[in-house]
Image (cartoon, rainbow, N blue to C red):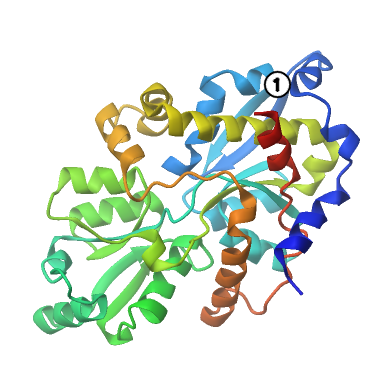
Amino acid sequence: MFTRRRILKAGSLLGAAALTQPVQAFAQTRATPLTVKVGLIPILAAAPIYVAEKEGWLKEAGLTPAVTTFESGPNAIQALASGTLDVYVAGVAPLVVARARGLDIKVVASTAIEENVFIAGPKLARFAEKDVPPAEVFKRFRAATGVPARLATQPLGSVPNTTLQYWLWEVAKADPKDVTIVSMGIDATQQAILAGAVDGGTLREPAVSIVTGRNPEIKLMALGGEMFPNQPGTVVAVTKAFLDKEPEAAQAVVTSIVRAIDLIGRDPAKVTPAIEGALGKGLIDSATIRRALASPATRFSADPRSIVEATAAMQKYQVKIGALDRDVSLDGLFDPRLYERALAAK
């Protein structure tokens, strides 16, 4: 039976002696830095990686991150399966799908929870009056326009897609005739909502702050916890091959992530330049990043144990909607020991 206790015990498969070596000692044993191939989705939940790099913690640990960005978790999984990535920073749901197909990977930390929210474009937002249930909003939209609301999200198997479908069918009890789900990448979703090409969709920060800042008629209609309770979001996962070969490096990555999330919570002003430089690339200003950090759609959390049960629930729902053909045991997917050591080191 799948339980949190079994997840905690699963970490014993790693060599404890290697992982207890201090990060500094690991760095000193290397003549040259170790390049760590990181695949991530450029969203606010990936900020801890950029903060850790900017603060110099990865360099101190003898690591040089080589970052590749992806439009969705399922796209990153393809690179992970091909062996071109060591570390994955994206949604947990695609990892469940990948595990069902034989990919051996370990979730060693979380970065954020309940990050996917539902945004209504101007045409749909007009019907989203206070105390009007979401199903009624979609019904009124179709009655007024003659067409179902077009809702954008990422591909089937992703956390945004699973979250949106769960909210529509299980929470809001929307009529399928009133909505149409359109699959597209993160940037395309943001642009489509701004351009009015879709009527709403799932977004994460900083896209939420960007679109609502550019057009005040675009509204936040549902928070992540309303859409899927304790919604598991972005995680840090490593391949078993990398974990077996470079356990100290894996520990250094997790320790840096934990330190970064702590710093983000304590001093958002200090980390804003690093996040703006990584995610903004001259297109997003500091004020938008600060709004995103203070947004109700932002909930940083490093503890992988906190999302075990919600991930199991999400997997069951993925089976229901056809993203998975069967329920797969999650025993061994989560390894919280690296997080626990990082926490103890604080």
Task: Decide if residue 86 is in sight here.
Answer: no
Q: What is the total number of numbered labels drawn onto the structure image?
A: 1
Q: Is residue 150 above or below residue 298?
A: below
Q: In the visual, does 291 lie left or right of 157?
A: left
Q: Is residue 340 above or below residue 314?
A: above
State the residue in front, 169 or 20. Answer: 20
Task: Decide if residue 301 is in sight here.
Answer: yes
Q: Position of residue 70 (x, y in %)?
A: 51, 46
Q: Residue at x 59, y 78 (%)?
A: 319
Q: Residue at x 68, y 77 (%)?
A: 327
> What's the amino acid at mark 1?
Ala
Q: Quadrant of the N terminus?
A: bottom right
Q: Quadrant of the C terminus?
A: top right
Q: In the visual, does 245 lie left or right of 252?
A: right
Q: In the visual, does 280 lie left or right of 306?
A: left
Q: Residue at x 17, y 43 (%)?
A: 214
As helix, strand or loop, the secondary structure at mark 1 comes to loop
Q: Which residue is mark 1?
A: 61
Q: Is residue 207 above or below residue 22?
A: below
Q: Residue at x 81, y 45 (%)?
A: 241
Q: In the visual, does 105 lie left or right of 71?
A: right
Q: Position of residue 265 (x, y in %)?
A: 44, 34
Q: Position of residue 245 (x, y in %)?
A: 85, 37
| Label 1 packing within 10 angstroms: few (<14), some (14-19), many (20+) | many
Quarter of the image for residue 315 reads bottom right
Q: Position of residue 329 (x, y in %)?
A: 74, 70
